[in-house]
Image: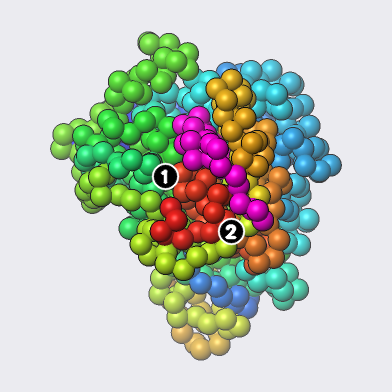
Amino acid sequence: MKMTMTQKILAAHCGLESVSAGQLIEADLDMVLGNDITAPVAINELEKAGLNKIFSREKISLVMDHFTPNKDIKAAEQCKQVRDFARYHGIINFFDVGEMGIEHALLPEKGLVKAGDCIIGADSHTCTYGALGAFSTGVGSTDMAAGMATGKAWFKVPAAIRFELAGKLPANVSGKDLILHIIGKIGVDGALYKSMEFAGDGVGSLSMDDRLCIANMAIEAGAKNGIFPVDDKTIAYMKQAGVADQSYTVYEPDSDAEYEQTIRIDLSEVTHTISFPHLPDNTRTPNEITEGIKIDQVVIGSCTNGRYEDMEVAAAVLKGKKVARDVRCIVIPATQKIYLECIRNGLAEIFVESGAIISTPTCGPCLGGHTGILAEGERAIATTNRNFVGRMGHPNSEVYLASPYVAAKVAVTGILKGDLI
Amino acid sequence: MMARKYLTYMKVTGKIHKYGDNVDTDVIIPARYLNTPNPDELKLYCMRDIDADFINKVQAGDIIVAGKNFGCGSSREHAPISIKASGVSCVIAESFARIFYRNAINIGLPIIESIEAAKAVQNGETLEIDFNKGEILNKSTGETFNVQAFPPFIQEIISAGGLLNRNKKKL
């Protein structure tokens, strides 16, 4: 049949035996996601079109994570609109302050997304769920509105790039370094309109948190989705999240699946990778960072790197050390569950004693929303996903993207320099 | 041939505002202005972090021209909404990021993918775009460019006046 993993999931969701790259299809959706920024636009669109019904109370998730806890009156009005909409329609998966976490950490943790699903979300990082072997992609608010009304979305079936991974990442090098390395190699439009399909023996060595981080940033290479094969680790993760055994489907690419390109990566050769301003593909490795760069703020969190393993790595670096004077270090566990684990396991104490702060779950500074905005000329190193002009604040501020390990190291020295990592 | 019933108009004329590669949706509409879904408010901050003066310069009918991967980054529909509300009649780029591409079609902001035209035309020149003929005329130089048609499925969305109207007809 020559189908990739993505193509197989899409074929199954549009009732066809097979699909091929370039074909336009209308697929059934297993989950439609929106947040406090994108859902209000979708709700207004539904109202304008006079559509007053939703396709499912269970298959819509609304997560109030971007400007929450409400940063200002307008943001509060937006959340209120979504809250009222959720109540009116009896939407079960509505998550507000107290239950919410950053959407792409929260949905997998709660078992709301699973292997074999077809998912859209009005947030570009919806591609995260490919880590579980799902087809999952970001859309805009009108697509979200149509999805909520009909349970369907149109897609052009993507071609794919296969990333064949071998070996194991070196100590302290993470999935973040791998995905930044890949984006640096292929560019911010290197996978435009395509799937990034990960394969090979090396996949097994990557933790689920690493896979979620890697799939999360597929969009930063322009990809439609990133997807991982399902193995024992995926199944154990879904089980822990409460996904019932019969409710998911494992798809594998055909042995003769067609890929536009195959890129082989020896994981043991990947090293710490940092994206310099102002594009994620502007990557450097420590040996290329010879001049020290003074850093004003460190952010450890986001849908990319706010999971428990990320917290553990950062805490291990910060334990018994102090955040450098003149550096503001903001740690944001991505969900309430991760937050609680940080408290129970002593990570919270390590962060506070080091001089870092711990924020309630929120997207906050990642998109320049709140809780850590940069002034003109300031520089941040962040475990987030974008370093565009003005992303974290003033248009003349700078963001350097890195792993939790590197970000925590820089928090201690206050200087980004290769030989200090 | 371009879509026959491209919204209500088939021809637009406007001055070019030209930008480079990878114009992301954060510079088109920075997140600090995303606390409203209102197009009339959003347009006030259109292109703010790449061209702070844009909103003072732009006139109804003007055309944005850019390089590769226009609209990359965040999925915020506020980006094409602010561009449309600012009076821009069409965006021409060498390529579009996929979410922006969908969003523009879904909300009825005309876009054209053309490497040739995007590379050749210059800031400040005037273009006339005939959607019916699939032709771009550079009125400042006399040069013309033929552009690719959208697939019929996408033409159907455009003809219906956006995705929701198309779906409503089918429901």
Q: From the image, which quarter does the C terminus of chain B lie in? A: top right
Picture layout, residue A90 above or below residue A383: above
Q: Chain of mark 2?
A: A
The amino acid at mark 2 is Ile
A357 to A272, vertically: above or below = above
B159 and A115: which is toward the camera = A115
Q: Which residue is mark 2?
A: A295
| Residue appearing at x 30%, y 42% in the figure | A170
Q: Is residue A355 above or below residue A220?
A: above
Residue at 33% across / 44% down in the picture?
A196
The secondary structure type at the circle numbered 2 is loop
Residue A243 as seen in the image, left or right of residue A51: left
What residue is shown with label 1? A176
**Which residues are the magenta region?**
A300-327
Badge 1 vs badge 2, beta-carbon distance below 8 Å: no
**Cα distance between the residues tagged 1 and 2:** 20 Å
Label 1 element class? helix
Find residue A67 and report its horizontal and vertical position in percent: 71, 41
Q: How is the image coloured?
A: rainbow
Question: In the image as oriented, which residue stretches furthest toward the bottom?
Answer: B141
Which residue shows up at 61% across the image and 30% down it? A348
Residue A344 picture location, percent across and down: 59, 20
In the shown orientation, is residue A1 left or right of residue B128?
left
